[in-house]
Amino acid sequence: MTGNRFNGRSDLEIGVGLRSKHIDHILSRKPDVSWFEIISENYMLGGGLALHHLDRILEQYRVVQHGVGLYVGSAEGVSRDHLMRIKDLVKRTGTPWVTDHLCWGSVDGTFSHDLLPLPYTWEAVDRSARNIRMIRDTLEVPFAVENVSSYAEFHDSEMTEWQFLTEVAERADCGILLDVNNIYVSSVNHGFDPMTYVENVPHERVAQIHIAGHARYERFIIDTHDHPVIDPVWKLYARAIELAGPTPTLLEWDARIPAFEEVHAEALKASRYWDHTAGRLAHAV
């Protein structure tokens, strides 16, 4: 299948997040998985069992690096040391692209270890785009930013979240990791139409898609990655690939993790939307 200039770089289809609980199963059973996504920061080490396992996975599977610590929206800029350690890992994994979140998370050298939302201002657009261009040029592989889930909003925002994501991606000339579960979570928490979000991002820049489950509470929902994907999120996903074309898709499941077979089966539910989109595109031609 062909894709846009960001997702057309590989034939990766539906992947699963690589989690330590599943390593033994994967290495012994060798399941038929298109690709695995790793959290870069879990492997930025000088050695040890995690890297040993990663090297064995790389013998059999393609791996894509996903980060949680670059903080591309930080006013202090990106940590050069952190970035160079990611670059070292890029050389090891041969990842076709690198992703991280459009957020901030540190101030004065103190790290929150959280993905904090940015104010949607032109100042934040310029700062984030500048940081992303530096990251992209340093890593020398394509880079994509992910929209985060959020639980608070800034009063001084000057645009919607999807407008902000679009402006950053356009000015940085980077890809987008479109997390449709994050869109749904934020839409419930902040009262906007999630389909409007999906329909108004630059689809030609969607390099990857995340799907996941979440936890619902009385007044809000949280992006916990500990449940199957719900129907409204699948509907957002279906619309996203209808607009962007079949796009490398990753299921996240990070807490209360079930057996690998259950996680993989949940991920493969995305294939029915791929098949529908592929058939529609073929018919159009």
Image: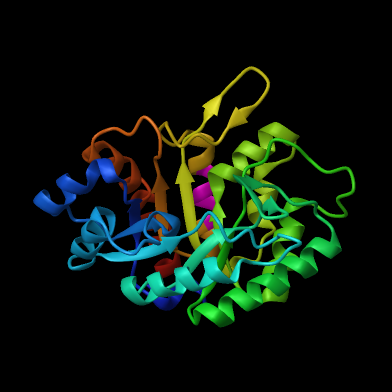
- The total number of labels drawn is 0
Magenta stretch bounds: 235-240
Q: Is residue 244 covered in magenta?
A: no
Work out whether residue 175 or residue 245 is closer to the camera in this orientation and state it: 175
Quick check: 86 left or right of 131? left
For the N terminus, the quadrant is: bottom left
Q: Is the residue 162 above or below the residue 260 in the image?
A: below
User: Percent x, y for residue 186?
Assistant: 66, 39
Q: Which residue is drawn at 16% across and 46% down?
A: 24
Q: Is the residue 36 above or below the residue 174 in the image?
A: above
Q: Is the residue 253 above or below the residue 59 in the image?
A: above
User: Percent x, y for residue 181?
Assistant: 54, 42
Residue pushed farthest left? 28
Quick check: 118 left or right of 82? right
Q: Can residue 2 be seen in this view?
A: no
Work out whether residue 139 or residue 212 is closer to the camera in this orientation and state it: 139
Q: Is residue 236 covered in magenta?
A: yes
Figure quadrant of residue 206: bottom right
Q: Which residue is drawn at 77% across and 68% down?
A: 127
User: Percent x, y for residue 133?
Assistant: 65, 77
Work out whether residue 150 or residue 84 is closer to the camera in this orientation and state it: 84
Q: Which residue is drawn at 26% across and 36% down?
A: 262
Work out whether residue 230 or residue 64 is closer to the camera in this orientation and state it: 64
